[in-house]
Every structure is written in structure tokens, then in C-alpha cells.
Amino acid sequence: MVAFSSLIQQDSIYYEIFSYLDTQEIVRSQRISRGFRASYQANLSHLINVYQRLREFFDDPNQFRVLLAKTGTIVAGSFILALLLRRRTFRDSNLDIYVHLQ
């Protein structure tokens, strides 16, 4: 019989597990072991794909992100909340952009 801990040593298995968990369950799962925490951090870019979500608003999300970095602008609001909760969208969701005036 194979031990559960040896079965989940592969990141692909962690990724599958995390894709079915909600945010609260992910936080709890990271308390299970260091392996869960490390794997979640390694798979975060696959679980939360900012580029894919920004394509809904921009033809070139990379150029938009470069502009954000150059200007110190941040994105907030329901767009970020939906992204972190791994929900497609919220009703009447939009992209809030905050710019620092100089």
C-alpha cells in the first residue's frame, strides 16, 4: 500500500487538488503540511492567471502590466476579488484602476 504523503509528492497532483478547493479550504490545506504550502505557492500562477483575466479587457495584457509598473498604478475592486476567489466574475464587475496623482 502506498502512503498518502508519497502519493501527493508530485506538483501535478497538488494542482488538481487545489483546483477543486475554495479559498478557505486552500488556507486550511496549507496548514496540513509544508508540502501543501510549497506546492500551492509553486502552482499559484496556474491557479490564478492574471494574464488570461486581463485579456477580457485588453488586447495586450502584458503592455497594460508594463504601464501599471511604470506608473505605479494598481488594479483593485471586484476584478481582483474575483481573481483571488477564483470566480469567473461578479455581477456588474468591472476593472478599478487607481492612479497616484503627482
Image (cartoon, rainbow, N blue to C red):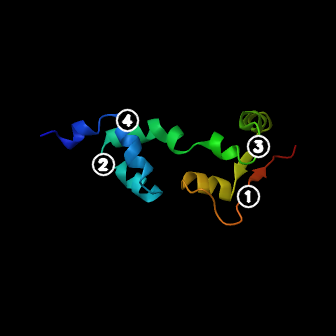
Check whether the beta carbons of the residues at disc 1 and disc 3 lie within 8 A of each other: no
Instruction: Give the residue drawn at x 37%, y 41%.
Output: 14
* Residue indicated by mark 4: 11
Up the image or down, 25 lies above or below 48; here it is below
* Residue indicated by mark 1: 94
Q: What residue type is labelled 3?
A: Phe
Q: Nearer the viewer, mark 1 or mark 2?
A: 1
Q: Which of marks 1 and 4 is nearer the N terminus?
A: 4
* Residue indicated by mark 3: 58
Q: Which amino acid does label 4 sit on?
A: Asp
Q: Where, quadrant-wise, is the C terminus in this rendering?
A: top right
Q: Distance between the residues labelled 1 and 3?
A: 13 Å
Q: Distance between the residues labelled 2 and 4?
A: 16 Å
In the rendered image, residue 97, in percent from the top left (x then y), is placed at: 77, 50
* Residue indicated by mark 2: 32
Q: How far apart are marks 2 and 3 (CA)?
A: 39 Å
| Local secondary structure at mark 2 | loop
User: In the current view of this chain or complex, which residue is farthest to the bottom?
Assistant: 91
Q: Which of marks 2 and 3 is nearer the N terminus?
A: 2
Q: Nearer the viewer, mark 2 or mark 4?
A: 4
| Local secondary structure at mark 1 | loop
